[in-house]
Amino acid sequence: MSLSSKSLILLRQKITEGLRIQRDTSDTVEYIDASNVVGDICARQNHTVFARRGCGKTLLLHHSSHALAKTPVRTVYLNCEDFKRHSFPNVLIEILDALFREIEKHLSGWFGKKKKSKELVRKIRDDLAKLRSSADVHEEKVRQLSAAEESAAVENSLGASLSVLEVKTGSALTATARNETERTFRRRSEKLRELDSWLPRLKEQVREFFEASTSVTAVFLQIDDLYHLKKSDQPFVVDYIHRLCKDVPLYFKIATLRHASSLYVDLDGQPIGAQERHDYQPINIDYTFSDFARTRNQNRDIFYEFAKSAGITKAEFDSLFKGAGFDRLVMAGGGVPRDTLSLFLEVLATVKSQGGEKIGKDDVRVISKSNFEKRIGELKQDSEGGEQDVLMRGIFVLREFCLSRETNAFLVREKELQQNDGYRLLIYRLLDYRIIHSAASALTHKSQPGTYQAFVVDIGCYAHLRKLDGRFNEVDVSAQETKERLRSAPIFEYSNFNSSLKSAPSNVEDALLGAGPDESDLG
């Protein structure tokens, strides 16, 4: 390759270290603010940051903490992955305790060395410890469900929603899921009673903290990766955090996957959680294929930043690619920076080991399947109970539809997405996990009425199959005529979806990931 081995080794090291942003090390990676969201996230307002995995949600939170360092605002960072195996309401108690543990750690710097402040935070943490013990007593009651009920009760999850699609059939099953939701609500209401009665006193204690401070006027509570909590717990956690922050100088900054999260529910006419645009403002930092040039430029700027840290110029970095190599890399990464960076490391090593000089589109094609397999693994790890099987079947059905139509693109009627909750949820969950990618919205078809959303399946679904060579009509989302080509893409009809979903093979994962008959001749 044209760059020296020393430069490439340093570039690989910089990218490898930056793939996962760790607390207190984010200053090694610059946040590329293409949409001017740093100013928003630093404002005294509740926010929720939505984006797929790997788009920079955590980096944005940490970057904002650095930006606020010289202001009278302080931040407390919590990652919900640390609490994902905790039962409710222990998970809420643990989050509250983590908040006040951080405040206790910075007590003298933020709120002065007053004895009263020290006693206040110690009292709060002691009260939380007592509540945690109390919650453990109730936990046994939570588990008093039969195996049959548990299999039916995937609360507020895809499995329950897709009962509409008859994936889970039977009125009795539907009633069981509904009854379980109601029972859970009643059970949680009982367990939250003590926390609720304590809330006014807790808020008064928070006010006392700020009255004692001469340097800190507000604290931002950064709650990262909310989607790691059980989906049915999320609105209850958000509800309490929202009420805690109201009318005191606390503001929440949540970061999560949009369609794997439940920030608000209405149960028996009672609102639980926080409503978008009413209780918090959304910040979307995702980049899709609907504006591929913008997504490509965003990813390229991130690579340039890493190259700069390794002493490599923009021109030298660009020289690592040939033809449409970089565009194909962004496509294979789904436009997600972390996926694109990770793929770059893999394909760079492969090309270099084979004595190649530059990365081309075929080099990316060869490794795209392994990236698809990683995404399947993430989906399995994050999805709950019965929804996992439904999601896997959904992937299989969409892939088979595209392969049978010999194209990577498909259209979905916007009206059908609006009218069918389970169908919409499945499509959007697959978007979250980068199995399919958004290519256009409010699109008109060349010969059919209505408006459509356009999607492309991930390159890893098909790029490794030699049998498609020469007759697969791939829509290149980087091309200028993409929108026009999408207008004639096949329509994925809701009416055919249910039967296709039920006819998927029982060993659907093997069908998706197993070696196909045409893979053995891959170069």
Image: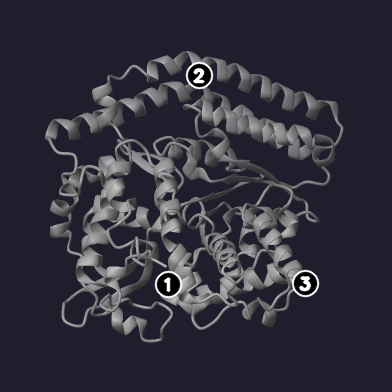
Q: Secondary structure at mark 1?
A: helix
Labelled disc at residue 289: 1
Q: Earlier in the sequence, mark 2 or mark 1?
A: 2
The image position of residue 125, as x and y in percent, is 67, 24
Residue behind mark 3: 311
Question: What's the residue type where badge 3 is placed?
Answer: Gly
x, y percent for residue 297: 56, 76
Mark pair 1, 3: CA separation: 31 Å
In the image: residue 60, left or right of residue 491: right
Q: Residue furthest bottom?
A: 481
Q: Is residue 304 above or below residue 29?
A: below
Count every numbered label the image shows and give the total: 3
State the image quarter where residue 492 is shown.
bottom left
- Which mark is drawn over residue 135? 2
Badge 3 marks a residue whose secondary structure is loop
Looking at the image, is mark 1 or mark 3 nearer the viewer? Answer: 3
445, 207: nearer the viewer: 445
The answer to whether residue 59 is left or right of residue 230 is right
Which numbered disc flags the more N-terminal residue, 3 or 2?
2
- Examine the image and state in which quarter residue 161 appears: top left
Task: Please tell me which residue is depicted at 43% across the width and 69% down the height of the picture.
Answer: 365
Disc 3 to disc 2: CB gap under 8 Å: no
Crowd around label 1: few <14 · some 14–19 · many ≥20 (10 Å): many
Q: Amino acid at mark 1?
A: Phe
Q: Kindly tell me whether residue 71 is visible in this rendering.
A: yes
Where residue 254 sits in the image (x, y, percent)?
55, 48
